[in-house]
Image (tube, grey):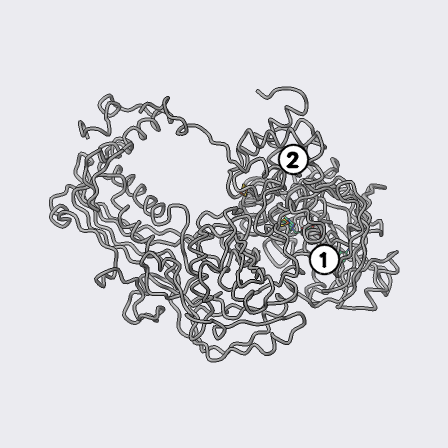
Amino acid sequence: MALKDLKIVGKSVRLRDLDTHVRGQTTYYEDVRIPRMLHLKMYRSPHPHAKILKIDTTEAAKQPGVVCVLTHEDMPGKKTFTPLAAIGVAPEDEPILAFDKVRWKGEPIAAVVAESEAAAKAAAPKVKVTFEELPAVFDVEEALKAEAPIVTPWGKNYYQYPDDHAASQIRYGDVERAFAEADHIVEDKYQTKPIEHAPLETTGCVAKPEGNGRYTVYTNIQALYFALDNTAAIVGLSPAKLRFVGGTVGGGFGGKVDIQVEPIATLAAIKTKRPVKYKYSREDEMRVSSTRAAWRIYVKDGVMNDGRIVARKITTYQDAGAYIRLSSYGTMKHAGHMPGPYTIPNVSVDAYCVFTNRPPSSAMRGFGVMSGSYAIELQMDKIAAVTGVDPWQLRLINAYRNGDMKAHRKAADDAALVETIQAAAQLAGQALPADFAAMSSDDRKGG
Amino acid sequence: MPEYIRSGSVEEAVGLIAEHGSSLWIMGGGTIVMQVLESGADYWQYIMGLDGLALDGIERANGSWRLGATATATQIRAQPDLPALAAAARMVGGPALQNAATVGGNIYARSPQGDLAVVLLALDARLHLATADGEQAPSLGEFYDDWEAAGRTPPGLLTAIEFAEPAGEVVFMKCGRRRFNSASVISVAVNVAQKDGKVTEARIALCGAGPHAQRCAAAEEAILGGKLDDAAIARAAAAAAAACAPVTDTVASEWYRRRMVGVYLRRALAQLA
Amino acid sequence: MTTKVLRLNVNGEDTLVPVGPMATLQEVLRDKLELTSVKVGCAQGGCGSCSVLIDGELRLACLTPAEAADGCTVTTLEGLNESNSIVPIQQSFIENYAAQCGFCTPGMLVATKALLERNPKPSRDEIIEALSGNLCRCTGYLPIIKAVEDAAAALSGKQSA
Ligand SMILES: Cc1cc2nc3c(=O)[nH]c(=O)nc-3n(C[C@H](O)[C@H](O)[C@H](O)COP(=O)(O)OP(=O)(O)OC[C@H]3O[C@@H](n4cnc5c(N)ncnc54)[C@H](O)[C@@H]3O)c2cc1C
Ligand code: FES
Ligand code: FES
């Protein structure tokens, strides 16, 4: 289909809610008027790793305006969850409210519910918890050493993929043989940092009892029905008793998928029979909401003098922080992506989803993939420097073409990298030699 | 939550300060006070606003300037005859913040905030403090020395800030994370008078390089009495970088701040060479 | 807990509002007067999503104690919605796709209004500076700056180049 025949692609589409945005009339969860609302503030772990010996809420409960204080003892059923359990992620490792241990600084322990936000904020620090501090680990490779403090309940600081694999793996061709035959070996280590989404609207929700055993939850979650299912399972209600109202999100970017506020607010609404608002302050958002994970990526490539990459071996570590959330899924995406948009006949990937005592990381725009691309494209420039092949041409030579088999055993279709690079070169005023300008995703002529 | 109170006059305000001691907190534009209250701090019984005291005048007479303590950054940035101070006022947050932020509050701000204070130090400004024991008029430098010693308890109500028409040229520069509305990595202000190719007066102040804006004697000495050439400027920059004591925070590291003190002081002095 | 009654003129109407100690103008506008265009992005002066006009001057409602605004005229986007001068700005934001999640948009519009009131023909740099207290995490600032340029041109009666 020619570009000119496309109705949407290549054109800007006007958002439906622009009209209400510019009039200040878009209704975010916080804008719904709900009378007699209570406010919830969380007492959080001051330690990155500690045993909980005792939780004493008596003092906090006595503070002016406080209606109740919830701890793990108030959980009607299960005490832990993982947001993607419905699609097979396991085990349910994350406490809704911590009970035996805390594994990151900021982990929720006790929810203080009060008549006003100020009262809840003033009372939350009065919760008294006796901890026994434990050694903590903050580095992915340190965490995998035998002597490292154990972060997870299952005793290994990595996510266990099916068949007890310690890593999400790809094996394709014979990497070692190809290395032996390659003209050059190009190796490096890449490190990315955690990134906070910093949405302009912080994470929050209001849970409202409807008086008939049903609850309405107004929320800015990005995953409305995952949140509904998880909340139902945690508070012990049938999903039919919950109505989630949302979809209007003041910026999410993947930062609002973790289902951190809805279950506790709903539980508090059940206990108090009053609407309960649980909203992160800006400080909470920066300190305790998840981030994009930091990655440590080792790349070893076998390259021929003409620029062809004949083998790639990757060992890569995602810092998931203390709990799984969306990280095991991100690691799998990452593993599949590490050959990049290039056709490489011999590939080996070991991608570890590693647990440390850092705040849990989770989804963020292309998580797993962006960090991989960062490493891959820096690596491509290094290969260009080593082989003396022009960096544009190097990418065109290796770009996948329709029909090429990718390392994770899916043939490329709808490939457009060659054309994209050609268009980018044109925009950048970069002349390509005639044979490169004539390349196409439909055949491998010249590449 | 504390109670918001106002006073009808400076005398009454001083009386309230004396009466309530540390349970009263003075609020100018509130851009710092309100943040602290929002963070949950609850030591105070009273917040005393200064609106209604008419302390916001800016006057120039007999070779000296007098800024009322509640003059805002917006008012100051509109002073064409105070270009360095106006440039600093323009760098205090964004326009909405500048409409609230007062020069008085800036004196008490914690480093790296204090973009106005750093220029006022280079101008050798004098404070007018109304206290129960009468008016005090310390220089800004003396004020900071005492303030540190007194555990940062303000000794009274700041009513005005006064300084002589600068004899030399004054330059303010700020190293931020973006062009406008950026917390300072550091900022520098220099006030240098030259005669017959020699530096006759030098005041150099740094912000973001210690607990509050501070003069840097080592850098001043490096240029005093000689020609303001590349070598002298490099000596001053190196002396300032060596002498300063920046902190690491979310804006910048100690290492980076120290580097930027040198870089920005060199750039500021180069404008006068 | 002492409650005081404030006299405010909000969006053209004289209003008496009871406020608790050290309530912010933001709380009063949102919770008492239900003017929810005033957003709460940070409550610390850092984001501009609570921008309002106090006696015509651009201010941050979160850093303003309600009691300090006693006797003042306060304008929120709801109040501007009815005015002819805001409609071309709103139109320009729509045409330039200058909003995505929309959370920053009311603050952006109020800040734009304050700018154009003071300076009807701002340069690009002046626009960037005037909006520097208003953060947007979604859109990218370019469409927003373009929207303000176009709005200024439309309001001052000429077409933008
Ligand atoms: C988003 C944001 C960005 C900022 N960016 C900058 C920046 O770039 N550069 C910068 O320098 N600052 C910055 N600040 C800090 C602050 O806004 C300024 O320093 C401002 O000048 C403080 O003045 P204020 O009147 O608002 O202070 P207030 O909050 O009113 O008071 C601050 C302190 O000064 C004391 N005080 C105020 N007036 C008097 C008086 N007359 N007598 C005695 N004590 C008094 C108060 O008791 C309090 O301790 C920023 C703040 C925010 C929220
Ligand atoms: S909410 Fe007021 S500036 Fe962010
Ligand atoms: S549109 Fe989302 S913050 Fe601006």
Q: Is residue B224 visible?
A: no
Is the C-beta of the residue carrying label 1 under 8 Å from the nearest atom of ligand 2?
no
- The dot on residue C112 is 2
Answer whether labels 2 and 1 touch (C-beta < 8 Å): no
Q: Tell which tag, 2 or 1, sits nearer the viewer.
A: 1
| A242 sits to left or right of A192 | right
Q: Nearer the viewer, residue B54 or B91?
A: B54
Residue shown at 24% from the left, 30% from the top: A441
| A181 sits to left or right of A213 | left
User: Amino acid under label 2?
Assistant: Thr
Measuring from the top left, give residue B196's x and y in whole percent: 68, 36
**How many other residues sit within 10 Å of disc 1, few (<14), some (14-19) or many (≥20)?**
some
Q: Earlier in the sequence, mark 2 or mark 1?
A: 1
Quadrant in which the N terminus of chain A appears: top left
Measuring from the top left, give residue B137's x and y in whole percent: 81, 57
- The dot on residue B8 is none
**Residue under disc 2 on the same chain as residue under disc 1:** yes
At numbered mark 2, what does the secondary structure look like: helix, strand or loop? helix
Measuring from the top left, give residue A138's x and y in whole percent: 39, 64
Subunit that carries the residue with mark 2: C
User: Amino acid under label 1?
Assistant: Ala
- Which quadrant of the structure image shows residue B1? bottom right
| A119 sits to left or right of A303 | right
According to the picture, the residue beneath numbered tag 1 turns out to be C23
At numbered mark 1, what does the secondary structure look like: helix, strand or loop? loop
Measuring from the top left, give residue A206's x and y in whole percent: 56, 57
Eyeballing the image, is A6 above or below A322? above
- The Cα–Cα distance between marks 2 and 1, rounded to whole angstroms, is 27 Å
Eyeballing the image, is B8 above or below C83? below
